Amino acid sequence: MYFKQFYLGCLAHASYLIGSAGEAVVVDPQRDVAQYIREAEAQGLTIKFVIETHLHADFVSGHRELAKRTGAEIVFGWQAGAQFQHRAARDGDELQVGQLRLRILETPGHTPESISVLVIEDGVPVKVLTGDTLFIGDVGRPDLVGSKGYTPEQMAALMYDSLHYKLLTLDDAVEVYPAHGAGSLCGKNMSKETSSTIGQQRRFNYALQPMTKEAFVKMMTADLPEAPAYFPKDAEINRSGAATLADAAALAALTPAKVRTLVESGAVVLDVRDAESFGAGHIPGSLNIGLGGQFASWAGMLIPIGAPIVIVADDSAQVEEAALRLARVGHEAIRGFLHGGVLAWHDAGFETAAVTQITVHELKDWLDEQRQFQLLDVRRPGEYSGGHAPSAVNAPLSHLAQQLASFDATRPTVVICAGGYRSSAGASILAQHGFRALYNVIGGTGAWVNAGFATSGASAVPPCQT
């Protein structure tokens, strides 16, 4: 058997290439598919099947393009209702890939159509690809099916059955490979590990500990974060099949005057530079989502799918990377990029804006001096409750625009997160709505804790990079 996991950190997404005797299958491919084709060719494999474990909501899959370019057959669980030619698999169906048998296990719970793929070698089950049903240290959320006739409680009950009557019946030695790792919003408590075994998960996964179905349902439906608005849209794109990236036209290089015209007509100016560069000078009203963090997820959450976008970056490599990562979450309406970047904008005589960057030591001094300012912590509620700078008010980035009425735009406003990434995005949103005296905390709450400063709430901040 040839087996390779492809891990995409920006989306905490894992996909797989499995091969045997000249044939291969790709499971849960990302939007850009050339890497699977290159790897298969390098290993002397022909891609025979493309399997989707479910209709992914957090990213757009490249299953149609991969099938078009390789002649592979697309396989979905029969309840997916995919709107293109595919094999609708049912529980117990098997696919032959070289000398391997891939057995389909229907494992609903995250979504109704969710399947897992059991890899059988020489008659022995050796690996199971669990999609978003079983993660390392967690299981899939039961609340992402929207208005499809299922409540979260009903889905959680299905999840219990899938775990206990399908996956946990496998031998402890069977290796587990999920579709996501830590950072994905498809679960609540995922490990940074990207593989495990059934035995390890039976022992250490909190959701697999002995409990009644009623207790499991109650646990899995409590304290769920709100699902991002783009999730249902991406799921529907995956149901109909996304356009081929290989056919996409080159991005237009836009003059400052053209960018200004687009801004006046409602385009989103997306500045993908880091917080320090953005803070030093940017186009007024632009949104900062740096490429250095979970760019694609935040772009999906903060920009409506279909909104026209103009990219501002340091160089052409950043532009190309940003466009690809936007496509991975369904953003296709990119009007182009600012040729020459912010320097060209400045040289054209147009106004720039800035966000002052301050250290945690400066913030500590301001608090000690009792300066008059408001301190907004844009981390998620669970992170905030784990420990935050004194007097900080929680205003999660995903809902910041809806909470603006709670804050005073005329007061100096300091924005903090875990490391300075989300806070820069938050400051840019506040600036769009008239907040002017804005400050971004370099290093965020992590730097605050590392400096030895006291926190309110718990004694330590859960580790988070952005």
Image (tube, grey):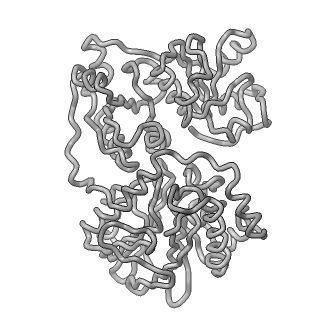
Q: Residue sitting at 22 percent across and 28 percent down?
A: 254
The residue that appears at 65% across and 17% down in the rendered structure is 374
Residue sitting farthest toward the bottom? 123
In the image: residue 431, left or right of residue 169 = left
- In this view, the residue in front, 260 or 197, is 260
Give the quadrant of the N terminus: bottom left
In-image side of 317 versus 418 (left or right): left
- Position of residue 182 relative to residue 429, above or below, is below
Q: Is residue 79 visible?
A: yes
Residue at 54 percent of width and 16 percent of height: 438
Q: Is residue 372 above or below residue 11?
A: above
Q: Nearer the viewer, residue 114 or 452?
A: 114
The residue shown at (61%, 64%) is 155
The image quadrant that residue 144 belongs to is: bottom right
Which of these two is toward me, 2 or 357? 357
Q: Position of residue 153 (x, y in %)?
A: 65, 61
**420 lies above or below 243:** above
Q: Can you give x and y, in whole percent of width and height, for residue 443 in the image?
A: 60, 29
* Quarter containing the C terminus: top right
Q: Please tell me whether residue 455 is drawn above or below residue 179 in the rendered image.
A: above
Q: Picture coordinates of residue 110 (x, y %)?
A: 56, 63
> Can residue 35 be seen from the camera position used here?
no
Q: Is residue 48 left or right of residue 414?
A: left
Q: How many marks?
A: 0
Residue 125 percent coordinates (x, y): 56, 83
Farthest residue to the front: give it: 149
